[in-house]
Image: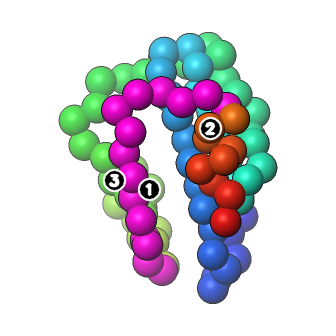
Amino acid sequence: SFVYGERTRIAFSYKTNLIHGARNGIAGTSDTSATIPALNQVNIGNYRSGNFHLGGCLEDVIYYPTAMSADEVVRLSRI
């Protein structure tokens, strides 16, 4: 869960059959059986339904056009 007023840094990387995620320097569980759908839109700050909008601000969003290793994702998520 997220705490109002607390800074949180999230990073993730994905490609077919390999997803890594981390928050504040702590790795999540990698998924090795993922099917990645074709994307034509990315919504940041709300659920797919359009409800529950982000109650804060985004300081940075960075896109890298290549998948990263689990270690790289953890490093990027450190505050």
Span of residues in magenta: 56-70
Q: Is residue 34 above or below residue 71?
A: above
Residue mark closest to the camera, 3 vs 2: 2
Residue at 48% over, 15% down: 16
Secondary structure under the numbered disc 2 in the rendered image: helix
At label 2, the amino acid type is Glu
What's the residue at 61%, 41% (across, down)? 73
The residue carrying pointer 2 sits among few (fewer than 14), some (14 to 19) or many (20 or more) residues within 10 Å by Cα, namely some
**Which residue matches tag 1?**
47
Residue in the image at 34% along x and 32% along y? 65
Going by the numbered disc 1, the residue's amino acid type is Tyr
Local secondary structure at mark 1: loop
Left or right for 9, reference 66: right
Q: Is residue 4 above or below residue 68?
A: below
**Residue denoted by label 3:** 43
Q: Earlier in the sequence, mark 3 or mark 2?
A: 3
Coordinates of residue 9 in the picture (x, y in percent): 60, 62
The CA distance from mark 2 to mark 1 is 26 Å
Which residue bears the numbered disc 2?
A: 72
Asked if residue 57 is among those painted magenta in the image, a careful observer would answer yes
Q: Can I make out residue 49 in this image?
A: no
Q: Position of residue 31 (x, y in %)?
A: 66, 24
At a point 44% along the width and 77% down the height, the residue shown is 57
Q: In this view of the protein, which residue sits in the foreground, 40 or 51?
A: 40
User: What main secondary structure does the magenta stretch of the protein show?
Assistant: loop
The image quarter in which residue 79 lies: bottom right
**72 w.r.t. 47: above or below:** above
